[in-house]
Amino acid sequence: GAGVSQSPSNKVTEKGKDVELRCDPISGHTALYWYRQRLGQGLEFLIYFQGNSAPDKSGLPSDRFSAERTGESVSTLTIQRTQQEDSAVYLCASSFRDREPDFGPGTRLTVT
Amino acid sequence: AQKVTQAQTEISVVEKEDVTLDCVYETRDTTYYLFWYKQPPSGELVFLIRRNSFDEQNEISGRYSWNFQKSTSSFNFTITASQVVDSAVYFCALRIANFGNEKLTFGTGTRLTIIP
């Protein structure tokens, strides 16, 4: 079946602009995760959804970052007033119960 | 809070050598899951194995094997007879089995380079 999809695959934006990154999880997966991976670095946890609620937002780096999930499906990560340090690959993953999370291909964000 | 430590930042071995990647975790929960993922140069994260905290049996899959020891909170990964295609960054991860709080915590990764 279809895996986790993310769009856009690449995004170049000017400093100060807002961006929206989208994640379409695997149908039926209840948990959804967002991670950030800077070049050559590990995976930095941003936020986790169970259904449409976010029990853990502890990883959002600032109030410029927000995320929502609707219909226990698609999720959007919004970054307002982007900064150069926001440049990274943003990865989304989804999972069902105790199964392993499936990762999407990521969105590469470049802030110029 | 959960924590995963991968102390080896980078490892290089000559092809056909065996190599072990270390993973040490911390959690106060008694029920949890451990994972290993591979991230090749192409960037996608590839799932390798999932292990729950009640199953300490070692697992072998082809050239890959995993050694889970609760006594030392370790979940090490060994590649036997390494190949160039094994070159990648490998991540160990931990998730507690608490419905409603299933944050997945990753280690910082180990970059493995297999030298032909």
Image (cartoon, coloured by chain):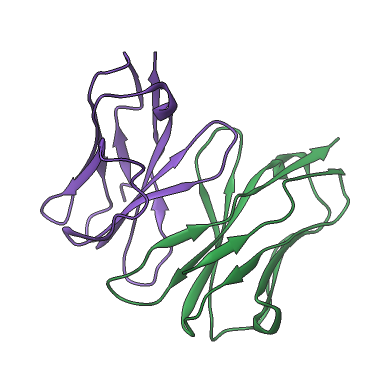
How many numbered discs, if any?
0
Pinpoint residue B71: horizontal percent, then vertical percent: 69, 84
Point 65% across, 76% down: residue: B73
Q: Which residue: 54% across, 81% down? A: B53
Left or right? Give the position of B44 relative to B78: left
Q: Residue at x 67, y 63 (%)?
A: B23
Residue located farthest toward the left when viewing the structure as drawn = A71
Image spot of residue B34 (x, y percent): 54, 69
Q: Quadrant of residue B25?
A: bottom right
The one nearer the camera, A69 or A58, is A58
Which chain is depicted purple? A
Quadrant of res A94: bottom left
Q: Is residue A29 above or below residue B41?
A: below
- Figure quadrant of the C terminus of chain B: top right
- Seen at 32% across and 71% down, the residue is A97
Task: Tell which chain the image draws in green.
Answer: B
Name which quarter of the figure residue B5 lies in.
Answer: bottom right
Residue at the extreme front: A63
Q: Is residue B83 left or right of residue A3?
A: right
Coordinates of residue B45 in the picture (x, y in percent):
51, 46
